[in-house]
Amino acid sequence: MLLGAIEAGGTKFVCATGAENGQVSDRISIPTTTPTETMTAVDDYFTTHPVDAIGIGSFGTIGVNPDDPKYGYITTTPKPGWGDFDFLGHLKSRFNIPLYWTTDVNEAAYGESMIGIAKDVPNSIYMTIGTGVGAGVISQNHIFNGRTHTELGHMRLNRLPGDDFKSNCPYHDICLEGLAAGPAVGKRTGKAGKDIPVDDPVWPIIADYIAQACVNLTVAFAPDKIILNGGVMNQRQLFPMIREKFAAYLNGYEEVPPLDDYIVPAGLGNNSGIAGGLLLAQVALKNA
Ligand code: ZN
């Protein structure tokens, strides 16, 4: 059996084939331009690499509730041309195979929970802090959805005293994404992430906001592990700062696992999403 995966991002789509254990056998990267151009390349890939099912994780927001008329759509996005695009319908019209449809972060969360750093625990949260912030919640080995998918990157935080940075989110003056995503770090320092020294005063600020988010995730979802990934988290010095602030903010209220095992980097690196897609393709096959 050969499985397929799509990790659909705002700058590139990764398409891959692989096995039931999440191991990738082939992959390509396609620039995200217009839906017509990009989807033609996706169609061509899976025509020349036939698979038994495909797991799809998409940027968005997207429709994930099967009762919603916009199920399978990218609903709203600042990416020109992609708003109100029937992604799943497009694939269904071309490939008569089981498809699993979810968000890009849920896909990556599933990969980490099944074969990555959280494979030994049933409850985990995967949060990526890069161009934007998003998180996928795995509860009892299943992807958590409510009325729609979560939007944990936009949780409200307490602004630090003295931090007068204007939020980078057009909707919220104190959300995690607006205060601490990659573009916010860039605007705060006037530098690209890789050019900011590890001891720059911006990092304790960023670590504080991420720690606040981790406390909120802990009290809301009671995970066994919180996985932090994405461009900002390549700054490994953030991890000890986040754990220290997290402990201070939780203030002993509840018992959590040892923090070195609780707030952790991803185990699969940049492969979390595509591995998750392959594993979700398998779920689609079982459900078919
Ligand atoms: Zn926001």
Image (cartoon, helix red, strand yellow):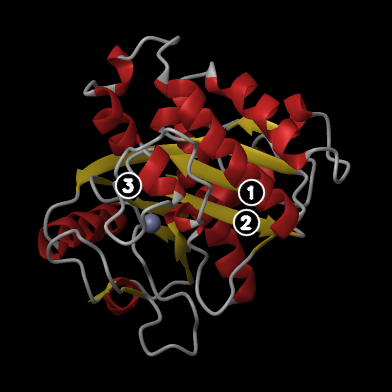
Cβ–Cβ under 8 Å for marks 2 and 1: yes
Q: Nearer the viewer, residue 164 or 8?
A: 164
Image quarter (top left, top right, bottom left or bottom right) of the N terminus: bottom right
Instruction: Determine the residue positioned at 61% across, 28% down.
Output: 242
Is the residue at mark 3 in contact range of ligand 1, meaning its CB lies under 8 Å from it? yes
Q: Relative to 151, is 262 on the left or the right?
A: right
Q: Amino acid at mark 2?
A: Val
Question: Is residue 144 placed above or below 263 in the rendered structure?
Answer: below
Q: Which residue is mark 3?
A: 167
Q: Where's residue 217, x and y in %?
A: 65, 51
Label 2 to label 1: alpha-carbon separation: 5 Å
Instruction: Determine the residue positioned at 45% across, 9% down.
Output: 199
Of all residues shown, which one is farthest toward the right?
255
Is the residue at mark 1 in contact range of ligand 1, meaning its CB lies under 8 Å from it? no
Classed neighbour count for the residue bearing mark 1: other residues with Cα under 10 Å, few (<14), some (14–19), many (≥20): many
Instruction: Determine the residue positioned at 75% across, 50% down.
Output: 223
Q: Is residue 231 visible?
A: yes
Disc 2 element: strand
The image quadrant of residue 139 is: bottom right
Q: Nearer the viewer, residue 67 or 29?
A: 67
Q: Earlier in the sequence, mark 3 or mark 2?
A: 2
Q: Earlier in the sequence, mark 2 or mark 1?
A: 1
Question: Is residue 50 placed above or below 168 in the rendered structure?
Answer: below
Q: Where's residue 20, x and y in %?
A: 60, 49
Q: Which residue is mark 1?
A: 125
Cβ–Cβ under 8 Å for marks 3 and 2: no
Q: Amino acid at mark 1?
A: Ile
Label 1 to label 3: alpha-carbon separation: 24 Å
Q: Amino acid at mark 3?
A: Ser
Q: Nearer the viewer, mark 3 or mark 2?
A: 3
Q: Is residue 16 visible?
A: no
Q: Relative to 55, is 142 on the left or the right?
A: right
